[in-house]
Amino acid sequence: MPVEMQLSRIIISEINEDQYVFLKEVDGDRQFPILIGIFEATSIDRRVKKVERLRPLTHDLIVGVVESMGGEMDSVVITDLKNHTYYAKLRIRSAGELIEIDARPSDALAIAVTTDPPLPIWVDENVIDEAIASL
Amino acid sequence: MPVEMQLSRIIISEINEDQYVFLKEVDGDRQFPILIGIFEATSIDRRVKKVERLRPLTHDLIVGVVESMGGEMDSVVITDLKNHTYYAKLRIRSAGELIEIDARPSDALAIAVTTDPPLPIWVDENVIDEAIASL
């Protein structure tokens, strides 16, 4: 069963390659960090802080492409955790269908916070258990 | 009139924030550089060198979204140069229509080299004139 979670913290380190975002349960207290790259961390951070963008940045472009093609962003879901690597899907409604597209969680989360209101973020129960067990 | 150009060089500097890609006329000798960020330069460089990607990176995700929604990447066009900033559009064929979406040239070029064969890159004649005049 997927559980709804939300972005609770973004940790950006200037002196370290590794950046983290934390997801926390909407109706509960469980949380876990996901390791992401500096580009994605900065992209998420700017969106959360609503920094104005003069031109569409990469994640804005994805939302623009979907809307121009008549689709609508639905949600993101983190489906798997294997060998310390998270796997996610982007869900798009298009022509009455729900399409799922493989994405890295960092891209999926950056897209989730690009839309207003942000997209719901779902995480599989198994992923939460494994993520917390490996802390 | 747009002129077909191709990626001729990518210059990545480890000690400098500014990276460059060069576009060169397919049927001629004119060329000019475009200043881009390190993330986009690395993304373009990896694609040109066909570095294997275990998970879909951000620009792969854009191509995946378009294909999953039944569209097809058509081409990219660099339409404008204002205050040292280039503007581009991504062209997508979808349901018999040609859709144009605003993009930064760096994203447009990264997408152009993601597909195999690469997408045609068109540059407006005015942009070439101004770009070369400002060298």
Image (cartoon, coloured by chain):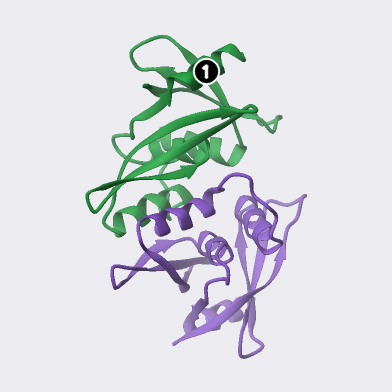
Chain colours: A purple, B green
For the N terminus of chain A, the image quarter is bottom left
Tag 1, which secondary structure?
A: strand
Residue at figure coordinates x 52%, y 34% from the top left: B87
Q: In the picture shown, does residue B130 fall above or below A47? A: above
Residue lying farthest to the bottom in this orientation: A28
Residue B20 placement (x, y as % from top left): 58, 26
Left/right placement of residue B110 relative to residue A101 reads right
Observer able to see residue A102 = yes
Is residue B107 or residue B125 the one in the foreground? B125
Residue B40 quadrant: top right
Residue at figure coordinates x 37%, y 10% from the top left: B28
Residue B78 placement (x, y as % from top left): 46, 30
Residue A83 placement (x, y as % from top left): 49, 66
For the C terminus of chain A, the image quarter is bottom right
Residue lying farthest to the left in this orientation: B96
Which residue is tagged 1? B32
Residue at figure coordinates x 28%, y 68% from the top left: A95
Q: In the picture shown, does residue A26 fall above or below A52? A: below
Q: In the picture shown, does residue A104 fall above or below B1? A: below
Observer able to see residue B11 = no
Residue A42 quadrant: bottom right
Residue at figure coordinates x 38%, y 29% from the top left: B121
Is residue A117 or residue B97 the one in the foreground? B97
Left/right placement of residue B70 relative to residue A107 reads left
